Image: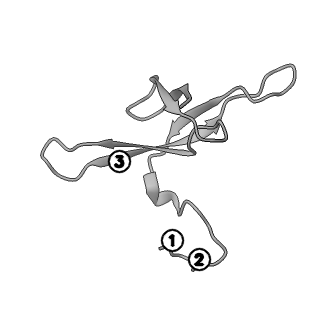
Amino acid sequence: MKSEDTPFVGGPLDGRVLPILLGPTGHPPKVYRVPVPDEAGGPATVLVYRRVAKAAGKRLGLHQGWTYEYDPEGDKAGPGLKWPWSKPGGGAA
């Protein structure tokens, strides 16, 4: 599988560059979740990073790659997929 070194901005992973596996389209996932285990043995905390396009190139305006920005709201920001048959206010079951 192909991977791409992707920088992380904000949150605990700020400044790190990690290899992220690319999907069949050649893009990394839109949302990257990092589980952090609790030291006391409780439930793990999940850090959520969202994919953002880097600035476009100067000459042709081509896409230069991706970066992940920390989302402090996490998964509470809303449902991931919106299907036409989904009920309002509820996620797809």
In this view, the residue in front, 71 or 81, is: 81
- x, y (%) of residue 41? 13, 48
Looking at marks 2 and 3 on the same chain, the residue that comes earlier in the sequence is marked by: 3
**Left or right placement of residue 11 versus residue 30 in this view:** left
Q: Earlier in the sequence, mark 1 or mark 2?
A: 2
> What type is the residue that disc 1 sits on?
Gly
Q: Is residue 72 left or right of residue 65?
A: left
Q: Residue at x 33, y 44 (%)?
A: 35
**Label 2, label 3: how many angstroms apart (C-alpha)?**
26 Å
Pointer 2 residue: 86
Element class at badge 2: loop
Report, in whole angstroms, how far the alpha carbon at label 1 lies from the one at label 2.
Answer: 7 Å
Q: Position of residue 37 (x, y in %)?
A: 24, 43
Task: Return the residue at label 1.
Answer: 91
Check the image and report above or below for 21 versus 5.
below
Residue 46, numbered circle: 3
Identified by mark 3, the residue type is Val
Mark 2 Cα-neighbour bin, 10 Å: few <14, some 14–19, many ≥20:
few
Residue 48 position in % (x across, y down): 44, 45
Q: Which of the 4 image quadrants contains residue 82?
A: bottom right
Q: Is the C-beta separation of discs 1 and 2 under 8 Å?
A: yes
Q: Depth-wise, is mark 2 or mark 3 nearer the camera?
A: 2
- Categorize mark 1 by other alpha carbons within 10 Å: few (<14), some (14-19), many (20+): few
Q: Name the residue: 83% across, 27% down.
A: 61
The residue lying toward the viewer, choosing from 36 and 24, is: 24
The disc at residue 20 is none
- Tag 2: residue type? Ser
Look at the picture and state if 93 lies above or below 42: below
- The secondary structure type at the circle numbered 1 is loop
Residue sitting at 17 percent across and 52 percent down? 42
